[in-house]
Image (cartoon, helix red, strand yellow):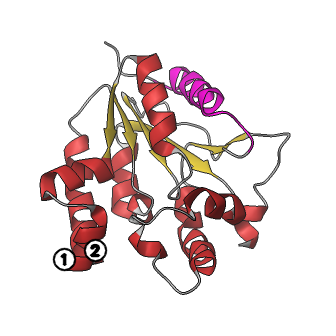
């Protein structure tokens, strides 16, 4: 995972991937990144600070399907789950005042990422494969990690998703930093982004 290792710079905890286009009038905040990186925890705090509604795409899919993500994968397959993700993403285009915690693989679909960028300031939360493994190693509800070597699976998935994650407006290292500090940082940069007049 050489590409991701290059991002590990404790002295520079944030990085803009490119200048934010003034033509994008962003009225939502979207958090992308790998499973276990802290999107839901950071998202809830950010939503409180912004007085926005918090929405977790995985949670919404589970509610609509009436079953867990693990059961959707087991009973319907990953393709069915990704189709549900695409539908949720399309519907978000018409919403305002949201902090969205996206599923780990959601941004790996180029269409999903393009859709998010039509209305949201997109922040990628990231951490090293080793840190992520420590966070998820005792969790049993992660279907993509049900593999003989889950650490190798994390490295593989990170390598596949890295080019998509890097297309976020902002990259934030979550290692060795309190969740409240990360949320405050994300909110600060969201407020500096071009916003739709209210």
Residue at horizontal 60%, vertical 56%?
135
Answer with left or right where residue 164 lies relative to residue 85: right
Say which mark, if any, is on residue 76. Answer: 1
- Residue 154 drawn at (x, y percent): 58, 72
Q: Is residue 191 magenta?
A: yes
Q: Is residue 51 magenta?
A: no
Which segment is the magenta one? 176-194
Q: Quadrant of the N terminus?
A: bottom right
Q: Quadrant of the C terminus?
A: top left
Do tag 1 and tag 2 residues touch (Cβ < 8 Å)? yes
Label 1 sits on a secondary structure element that is helix
Label 2 sits on a secondary structure element that is helix
Circle 1 Cα neighbour tier, 10 Å, few/some/many (<14 / 14–19 / ≥20): few
- Residue 117 drawn at (x, y percent): 40, 44
Residue at horizontal 76%, vertical 71%?
2
Answer with left or right where residue 106 lies relative to residue 171: left
Main SS category, magenta section? helix
Q: Quick one: 3 or 154, which is closer to the camera?
A: 154
Say which mark, if any, is on residue 73. Answer: 2
Q: Quick one: 17 or 88, which is closer to the camera?
A: 88
Where residue 72 sits, quadrant-wise, is bottom left
- Residue 14 drawn at (x, y percent): 71, 39
- Residue 24 drawn at (x, y percent): 42, 34
Where residue 152 sits, quadrant-wise, is bottom right
Q: Would you place residue 63 above or below residue 153 in this image?
A: above
**What's the CA distance linking mark 1 and mark 2?**
6 Å
Q: Would you place residue 163 above or below residue 61 in this image?
A: below
């Amino acid at each position: 995972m050489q590409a991701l290792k290059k991002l590990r710079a404790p002295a520079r905890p944030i990085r803009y991937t490119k200048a934010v286009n003034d033509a994008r009038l962003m009225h939502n905040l979207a958090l992308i990144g790998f499973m276990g990186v802290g999107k839901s925890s950071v998202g809830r705090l950010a939503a409180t600070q912004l007085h926005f509604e918090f929405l977790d795409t995985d949670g919404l899919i589970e509610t609509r399907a009436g079953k867990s993500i693990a059961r959707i994968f087991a009973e319907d397959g990953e393709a069915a789950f990704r189709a549900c993700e695409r539908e949720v993403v399309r519907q978000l285009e018409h919403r305002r005042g949201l902090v969205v915690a996206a599923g780990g693989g959601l941004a790996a679909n180029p269409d999903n990422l393009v859709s998010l960028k039509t209305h949201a300031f997109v922040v990628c939360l990231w951490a090293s494969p080793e840190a992520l493994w420590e966070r998820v190693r005792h969790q049993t509800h992660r279907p993509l990690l049900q593999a003989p070597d889950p650490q190798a699976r994390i490295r593989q998935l990170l390598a596949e998703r890295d080019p998509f994650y890097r297309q976020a407006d902002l990259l934030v290292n979550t290692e060795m930093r309190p969740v409240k500090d990360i949320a405050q940082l994300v909110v600060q940069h969201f407020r500096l982004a071009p916003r739709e007049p209210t």
